[in-house]
Image (cartoon, rainbow, N blue to C red):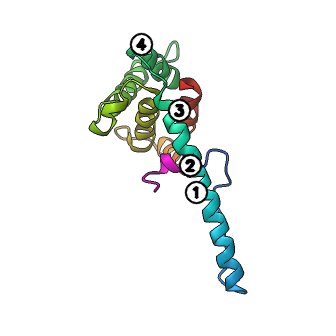
Amino acid sequence: RVVCMNTLNLALHDAVRSVRIRHIGDVGKKVEKAREILGISSEYMTVLNKKAEQLATIKMNDTEIQRVVESLLPIKEGAKAEVSDEIVKERLAIWDALKVDNLANHRNDAWGVINAVADFADHYSQKDPTEKQKEAKFESVVSGAKLLDKALQLVA
């Protein structure tokens, strides 16, 4: 069962993300089509489970995790102090997400890092975000978080 948007995005990484079935015409054929689609979705969840198991075998120490976090949220040379401070807060938010109870068994593996990044991508919000930041956040949640895709590349 999908429990959050990040799980769905990870499962459907290369998949078409929407299907429409009109509720008119031959209902029997449409029910059959729906069953076919659900079967395909089940295959994606099987792939996700295998990927999660694989990522859980990749052990990461704090230095490696820090490199991933810094690669995901770089501070550009010459950045203003308030920008640098915000990025440092965001990095700490990923570390905080890695420390939650339900990741206790995955704090030092790639699956834990992916889950922490996913939590950050979906739930972290800046204090008084601009309209542009709000739009970027909405876009990342709807279209699949680019940050999560990059994290997957880095930990693999």
Closer to the eye: label 4 or 1: 1
Above or below — where is 105 with respect to 70? below
Main secondary structure of the magenta stretch: helix
Q: CA distance from mark 2 to mark 4?
A: 31 Å
Q: Which residues are magenta?
A: 1-11
Q: Are marks 1 and 2 in contact (CB under 8 Å)?
A: yes
Q: CA distance from mark 2 to mark 3?
A: 12 Å
User: Disc 4 and disc 1: Cα gap in Å?
Assistant: 36 Å
Q: CA distance from mark 1 to mark 2?
A: 6 Å
> Alpha-carbon distance for marks 3 and 4?
21 Å
**Relative height, residue 21 to residue 151 (above, below):** below
Point out which mark residue 42 bears: 1
Is 91 left or right of 146, judged from the image as shown?
left
Badge 4 density bin: few <14, some 14–19, many ≥20, Cα 10 Å:
few
Residue 54's disc is: 3
Describe the element under mark 1 as helix, strand or loop. helix
The kind of residue tagged 3 is Gln
Label 2 CA crowd tier, 10 Å (few <14, some 14–19, many 20+): few
Name the secondary structure under disc 2: helix
Q: Position of residue 116 (x, y in %)?
A: 40, 34
Q: Mark 1 or mark 4, which is nearer the start of the sequence?
A: 1
Mark 2 lies on residue:
46
- The image shows residue 27 at horizontal and vertical percentages of 67, 85
The residue nearer to you, when weighing 151 against 85, is: 151
- Residue labelled with disc 4: 63
Q: Can residue 144 be seen here?
A: no
